[in-house]
């Protein structure tokens, strides 16, 4: 087999484009871009608002609040779409990225790969083991270690970042902390605000509030009342160019996560920009950030506050060197292609 045709299935409720906040969507975007450059046939089933390099097959989109009822309506539309694509195109492999993938797995003979982007406890393990023709992969060794024994033989393909063609701007003296990503309770951005105010350092929050009731409630109750449009700002969604500028000029990027992160593209991108990272001692974060070298790993809010005051001790050039040597998107895509070929034999 010389040229593979890959049908990537994204999470139906988040657009895949340069201003996406979710890690899984960013990986889909990077994979599609680099697979297309490598002359593979890349098809992506995703929200109609997505902007990709290959061929987009649009999922009908709802503008309503994402409730369980609304999810089921969309799921019922995804399976027929998948079967239609497979019947009209020569597809070698299906690659799913959504946490809810099992709701729209088609009954087909084509090999299926599911990348587990989130902690394993968020997936229905029993249902997953009943599926046929399905392979799984993790995005970090820490994630695999925390999975049940039955999953230990599944491979790890670490996430990578693609910043080819992105010019890192000359750093101006930015004296603000940056929190960036999905605005939801488990990301702990309210903790970031509290720490910033205690330390007396301005903070910028960038990212997206997805239309889930719990996310909207969290933003309205925990984030919005603490903003002042001066020292404590919410910039909203930013594209890749603006994100790089925000990261480059920040004193540090703060990741006060309350869950065991399976990876962190935010941390990788920050280091690529030469910006130290201060993060919770959760999941894969300690494997990405080298304590005292590219940032600080902290177990309490007090440790985070102290770390923010000490980030001037971190060598920004070293951060960039580490990111370039460890977090290559090219290596990630190469590993996925090798896995595709292995399971399609």
Image: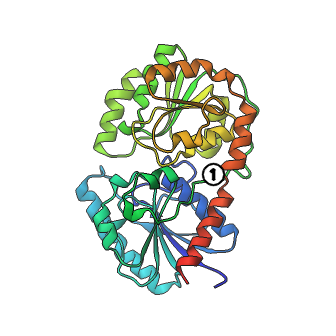
Give the residue pinned by disc 1: 161
Q: Residue furthest left?
A: 69
Is residue 227 among the parts visible in the rendering?
no
Look at the numbered disc 1 and give the secondary structure of its residue.
Answer: loop
Which residue of the protein is positioned furthest toward the front in this rendering? 149
Instruction: Place residue 293 in its image quadrant.
Output: top right
Tell me where residue 227 sits by quadrant: top left
Residue 55 rendering spot, x and y as whole percentages:
56, 71
Q: Is residue 130 left or right of residue 145?
A: left
Q: Is residue 288 above or below residue 219?
A: below
Q: Residue at x 57, y 77 (%)?
A: 342
Residue 324: where, in percent of width, then height?
Answer: 72, 47
Residue drawn 75% across and 43% down? 167
- Give the color scheme: rainbow, by chain, secondary structure or one colour: rainbow
Q: Quadrant of the N terminus?
A: bottom right
Name which residue lies at 32% across and 62% down.
125
60, above or below 171, in the image: below
Dividing the picture into quadrants, the one containing residue 187 is: top left
| Visible residue check, residue 88 | yes
Dot 1: within a 10 Å radius of its alpha carbon, few (fewer than 14), some, or many (20 or more) residues?
many
- Residue 180 against residue 87 in the figure, above or below: above
| Left/right of residue 29 with respect to residue 170 in the rendered view | left
Q: Say which of 91 and 212 sits in front.
A: 91
Query: Front-most of 323 and 100?
Result: 323
Q: Where does residue 140 sit, x and y in percent of width and height?
A: 52, 53
The C terminus lies in quadrant? bottom right
In the image, 26 versus 62, the foreground residue is 26
Position of residue 59 in the picture relative to residue 23 (left or right): left
Q: Horizontal and vertical percent for residue 198?
A: 47, 14
Q: Is residue 77 above or below residue 174?
A: below
């Amino acid at each position: 087999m010389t040229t593979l045709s890959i049908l990537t299935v994204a999470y139906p409720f988040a657009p895949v484009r340069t201003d996406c906040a979710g890690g899984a969507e960013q990986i889909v975007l990077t994979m599609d871009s680099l697979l297309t450059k490598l002359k593979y046939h890349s098809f992506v089933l995703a929200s109609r608002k997505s902007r990709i390099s290959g061929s987009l097959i649009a999922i009908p989109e709802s503008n309503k609040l994402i409730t369980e009822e609304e999810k089921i309506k969309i799921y019922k539309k995804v399976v027929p779409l998948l079967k239609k694509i497979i019947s009209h195109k020569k597809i070698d492999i299906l690659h799913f990225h959504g946490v809810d993938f099992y709701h729209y797995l088609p009954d087909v003979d084509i090999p299926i790969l599911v990348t587990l982007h989130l902690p394993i406890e968020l997936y229905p393990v029993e249902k997953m083991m009943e599926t046929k023709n399905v392979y799984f992969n993790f995005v970090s060794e820490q994630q695999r270690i925390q999975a049940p024994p039955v999953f230990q033989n599944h491979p790890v393909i670490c996430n990578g970042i693609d910043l080819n063609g992105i010019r890192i701007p000359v750093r101006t003296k930015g004296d603000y902390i940056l929190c960036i990503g999905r605005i939801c309770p488990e990301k702990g951005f309210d903790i970031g605000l509290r720490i910033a105010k205690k330390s007396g350092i301005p903070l910028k929050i960038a990212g997206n509030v997805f239309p889930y009731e719990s996310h909207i409630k969290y933003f309205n109750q925990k984030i919005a009342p603490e903003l002042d449009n001066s020292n404590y700002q919410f910039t909203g969604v930013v594209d890749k160019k603006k994100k790089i500028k925000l990261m480059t000029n920040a004193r540090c990027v703060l990741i006060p996560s309350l869950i065991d992160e399976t990876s962190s593209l935010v941390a990788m991108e920050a280091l690529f920009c030469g910006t130290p990272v201060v993060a919770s001692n959760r999941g894969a974060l300690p494997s990405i950030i080298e304590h005292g070298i590219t940032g600080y790993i902290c177990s309490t809010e007090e440790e985070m506050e102290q770390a923010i005051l000490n980030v001037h001790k971190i060598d920004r050039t070293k951060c960039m060197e580490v990111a370039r040597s460890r977090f290559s998107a090219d290596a990630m895509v190469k590993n996925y292609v090798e896995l595709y070929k292995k399971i399609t034999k």
